[in-house]
Amino acid sequence: MHPSASDDQTLPVENAPQVALLVRLLKLGTLVNGPMKDGVCDPAQVTQLELKVMMALVGEGALAGHDLVEIMGAPPMNVSRALASLRKHGWIEDTVDPDNRRRKPVRLSPAGLEKYASMAPSLETVASALVGNLSAREAREFAKIGDRVIDNMADWITGHHGDVGMKR
């Protein structure tokens, strides 16, 4: 049985509407990992963190390891391992930051872009299973709200870690 918001076990802070939304967002972020692992990562033979790094590089462009650590909230060693694995497969390559020569960004290589594209059918299958029953209006609203929350998260990250190379 799943507890409801009215159960006595609810933390007092969860009675605040914004905190309740944050808890839902955390739950959404946690629960999506299962279908992504089973439906995308396992068939593609990549770890979830490797996939997340690839997605970050596709969405944000070239990023340094410390950028990925801050964006994903992952431990540096885990990001380092994911980058080492992606490099071993030839899916990332070094690039240069013309504004900061000490920064060591990476981007997806042509082979990495090809690997990422090969996962599109699996991503479509998982997307269909998870959000395919939303109406077109609900999907547009969800995307619009998601974009606003993502912008707020990006503001938080860059506000706390100003050197993170995120698109703004």
Image (cartoon, grey):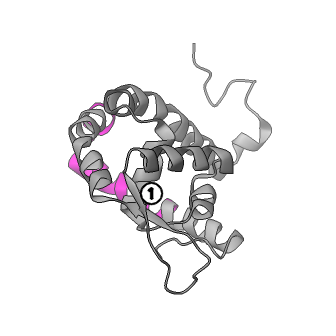
The range drawn in magenta is 129-149
147, above or below 100, in the image: above
Residue 159 or 47: which is nearer the viewer? 47
Work out whether residue 127 can be spotted.
yes
Work out whether residue 75 can be spotted.
no
Q: Residue furthest top?
A: 1
Describe residue 66's horizontal placement relative to residue 145 as left or right.
right
Describe residue 111's horizontal placement relative to residue 12 as left or right.
left
- What is the secondary structure assignment of the residue under circle 1? helix
43, above or below 123, in the image: above
Which image quarter: residue 27?
Answer: top right
Residue at image coords 62%, 21%? 3
Residue 108 or 133: which is nearer the viewer? 108
Amino acid at circle 1: Ala
Residue at image coords 58%, 19%? 2
Residue at image coords 73%, 30%? 10
Look at the image and say whether residue 132 sits in the magenta stretch.
yes
The image shows residue 86 at horizontal and vertical percentages of: 44, 47
Q: Residue furthest right?
A: 12
Describe residue 69's horizontal placement relative to residue 34 as left or right.
right
Which image quarter: residue 161?
Answer: bottom right
Q: Main secondary structure of the magenta part?
A: helix
The image shows residue 26 at horizontal and vertical percentages of: 59, 42
The image shows residue 85 at horizontal and vertical percentages of: 48, 43
Quadrant the N terminus occupies = top right
- Residue receiving disc 1: 56
Look at the image and say whether residue 11 sits in the magenta stretch.
no
